[in-house]
Amino acid sequence: MRKITYKQAINPHAKNRGSIPEMVAGYDFGIPGLAVRKVWGTWQIDHTPSGYRAFAYLHSTRAACVNAALEANAQVPGIDWTADASVITSAHLHNAIDDWRYVFNHGRLREPIPSDSEIVCHGWTMADLEAFLYDGVSDGLCGTCGEVSGNHEPDATNNWCPCCDAKKVTSALVLAGLI
């Protein structure tokens, strides 16, 4: 890593604007257009062409911050960080930037949202689960006999199974992780 100096963006409405340094020092870590620097005890990634802080407040070491940025860049390739801020924040890059940020924060890509016809849990589709959410009652699955019974309230306290009399019925919404 080599140390670089670049101009940071300063909020024109900041009350203490005169005390904020216009030029800052950071480290080029291998992704053109991005730099890493320490601010207020944590490391952040700056977009050097615009001077804006891009991703911040999560990493206490430079190595962790750089590794997270490199991992995000590997999982979400194709973003030209050397472009100016208007290109980076444009609508056509919105999803890619959100994905990059998610990987930077969590170390992995988001799970895709299932389609309405895709089976999510025990034969229930996303459309079924959404209907259960709107109705306030849902199918339930018995943990003893495996029977699926209807009209099970997600917050039911009895959890009674009409087939085997066990009190082990769990709502489809709970099983799918929606509530």
Image: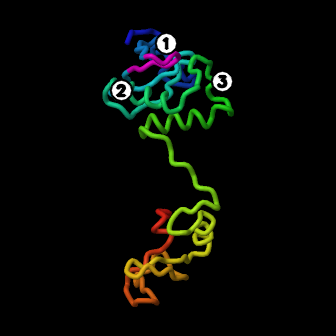
The residue at the point 47 percent across, 81 percent down is 147
Q: Nearer the viewer, residue 28 or 117?
A: 117
User: Badge 1: few (under 14), some or many (20 or more) residues near its Cα, within 10 Å?
Assistant: few
Residue at the spot 45% in from the left edge and 14% down from the top edge: 21
Is 6 located above or below residue 144 in the figure?
A: above
Q: Position of residue 33 (x, y in %)?
A: 53, 17
Q: Which amino acid does label 3 sit on?
A: Val
Q: Which of 148 and 150 is in front in this view?
A: 148
Of mark 2 and mark 3, the one earlier in the sequence is 2
Amino acid type, label 1: Glu
Give the number of the mark in front: 2 or 3: 3
Q: In this view, does 151 lie above or below 134?
A: below
Q: In this view, does 2 lie to the left or right of 112?
A: left
Which mark, by number, is residue 40? 2
> In terms of sequence position, does the residue under pointer 1 or pointer 3 come before the other?
1
Q: Which residue matches tag 1?
A: 22
- Residue of label 3: 87
Vertical side of 117 occupied by 46: above or below: above
Sequence order check, earlier mark of 1 and 2: 1
Name which residue type carries label 2. Answer: Trp
| Left or right for 19, reference 9 | left
